[in-house]
Image (cartoon, rainbow, N blue to C red):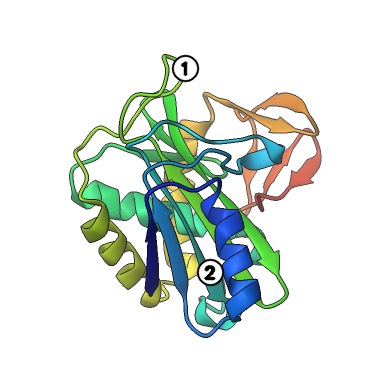
């Protein structure tokens, strides 16, 4: 994994896309910073946080991902593997469907995944320090370089979606206490049915997790 470290950037996601556009894709690449001023969140929202938090975006070719990984569940896959790495350091972080990092009942970060032809772009933001009373922050001190090294080493192993989903579907029970925004409306996940491709059935509608 080629890693580009920046002190400050408007958006790691936008920077990475422009970088690949100008230089073309030759190898998995990551852009990481501790401060971004105009981050891209889900549903067009921003995710900026404060200086000292973790923001990174990376890109893979689809062929470098597990064959059984559904396109619509890239965000779940990338999020859950990072959660596994953070757990090794003692964190109690969990993943709320489909792409949010939580400590107890507060969001501390999120994942967004976008596609461009054969390339998969993933952006992740994690609050390492407090941002506001509305959001939480990671419950452990983090060595960012070591964490990213372990994370990308784990992604390189191409763990199967079946393996990741078998664990995620157990953790999904925690999401039932929360709501999710669907078609600009808040919907309870209490009675949602989680499908094997990472989507859910809610109010007689199938909703995919790609963001």
* Horizontal arrangement in the rendering, residue 210 relative to residue 98 (left or right): right
Number of other residues with Cα within 10 Å of mark 2, as a class: few under 14, some 14 to 19, many 20 or more: many
Label 1 or label 2, whichever comes before in sequence order: 2
Q: Secondary structure at mark 2?
A: strand
Figure quadrant of residue 136? top left
Number of other residues with Cα within 10 Å of mark 1, as a class: few under 14, some 14 to 19, many 20 or more: few
Q: How many marks?
A: 2
Q: Is residue 75 visible?
A: no
Residue name at image x 57 percent, y 69 percent: 19
Q: Is residue 116 visible?
A: yes
Give x and y (percent) for residue 154: 33, 69
Question: In the rendered image, which residue does mark 2 sit on?
Answer: 59
Residue name at image x 65 percent, y 49 percent: 209
Residue name at image x 58 percent, y 39 percent: 38
Residue 71 to residue 93: above or below = below
Q: Secondary structure at mark 1?
A: loop
Disc 1 versus disc 2: distance between alpha carbons? 30 Å
Q: Nearer the viewer, residue 55 or 159?
A: 55
Question: In the rendered image, which residue does mark 1 sit on?
Answer: 134
Give x and y (percent) for residue 206: 77, 46
* Horizontal arrangement in the rendering, residue 160 relative to residue 87 (left or right): right
Circles 1 and 2: CB distance less than 8 Å?
Answer: no
């Amino acid at each position: 994994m080629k890693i580009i470290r920046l002190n400050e950037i408007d958006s790691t996601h936008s920077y990475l896309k422009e970088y690949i556009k100008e230089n073309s894709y030759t190898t998995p690449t990551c852009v990481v910073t501790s401060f971004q001023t105009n981050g891209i969140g889900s549903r067009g929202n921003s995710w900026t946080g404060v200086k000292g938090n973790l923001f990174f975006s990376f890109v893979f070719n689809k062929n470098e991902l597990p064959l059984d990984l559904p396109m619509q569940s890239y965000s779940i896959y990338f999020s859950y593997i990072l959660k596994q790495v953070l757990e090794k350091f003692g964190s109690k972080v969990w993943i709320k469907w489909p792409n949010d990092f939580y400590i107890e009942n507060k969001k501390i970060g999120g994942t967004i995944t976008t596609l461009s032809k054969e390339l998969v772009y993933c952006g992740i933001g994690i609050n390492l320090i407090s941002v506001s009373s509305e959001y939480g922050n990671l419950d452990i001190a983090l060595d960012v370089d070591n964490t990213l090294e372990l994370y990308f080493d784990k992604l390189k192993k191409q763990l199967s979606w079946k393996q990741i989903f078998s664990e995620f579907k157990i953790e999904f029970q925690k999401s039932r206490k929360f709501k999710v925004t669907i078609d600009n409306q808040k919907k309870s996940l209490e009675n949602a049915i989680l499908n094997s491709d990472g989507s859910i059935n809610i109010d007689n509608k199938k909703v995919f997790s790609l963001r």
